[in-house]
Image (spheres, rainbow, N blue to C red):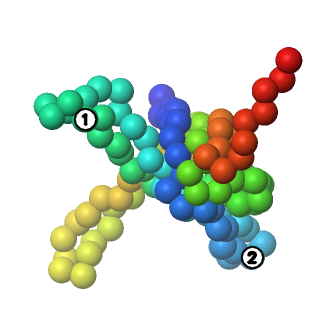
Amino acid sequence: MNHVILIGRLVESPKSETYEENIDRMAVTLAVPRTFKNKDGIYETDFIRCILWNAIAKKTEEYCKKGDMVAIRGRLQVSKYVNEEGKEEYHEEVITESLSFVSSLHRKEEAYS
């Protein structure tokens, strides 16, 4: 089973692009902190490329900004290609099936009583 769940912050404000005819596509990078410290006592961060399509891409562009925390559910896709030097290279990315807004650095949180 190929199932990925990530929670992290958007590295830059999302911007969709038209891919082929009337298909919206977006690539975002998610900064995901690791749950353990390295030998120097620091939590490292992984930067993971995620691909969003159509309605998910449009809504993310409309409602999310750089620094917002989101949760992504999707699948890992690995593509193989031959570079200019003739060597095989692999490219990993998460194909997003759903995205949920978690929190923002830009919006004031309101307390409800």
Furthest residue to the left? Answer: 39
Q: Position of residue 17 (x, y in %)?
A: 66, 73
Outermost residue, top direction?
113
Q: Is residue 39 left or right of residue 56?
A: left
Q: Amino acid at mark 1?
A: Ile
Left or right of residue 60: residue 78: left
Residue flagged by tag 2: what amino acid is it? Glu
Q: Judge whether residue 47 can be spotted in this image.
A: yes
Outermost residue to the bottom: 84
Local SS, label 2: loop
Q: Which mark is residue 96?
A: none
Point out residue 99 in the picture as x, y percentages from the top left corner: 66, 42
- Going 65% across and 56% down the picture, which residue do you hit? 65
The disc at residue 21 is: 2
Q: Is residue 50 visible in this depiction of the protein?
A: no
The residue pinned by badge 1 equals: 42
> Does 67 sit above or below residue 113?
below
- The residue located at (78%, 72%) in the rendering is 22
Viewport quadrant of the C terminus: top right
Q: Percent x, y for residue 83?
A: 26, 75
Spatial CA span between label 1 and label 2: 46 Å
Q: Are marks 1 and 2 in contact (CB under 8 Å)?
A: no
Q: How many numbered discs sit on the rendered protein?
A: 2
How many residues crowd mark 1 within 10 Å: few (<14), some (14–19), many (20+)? Answer: few
Q: What is the secondary structure assignment of the residue under circle 1?
A: loop
Sequence-earlier tag: 1 or 2: 2
Q: Is 113 in front, or is 56?
A: 113
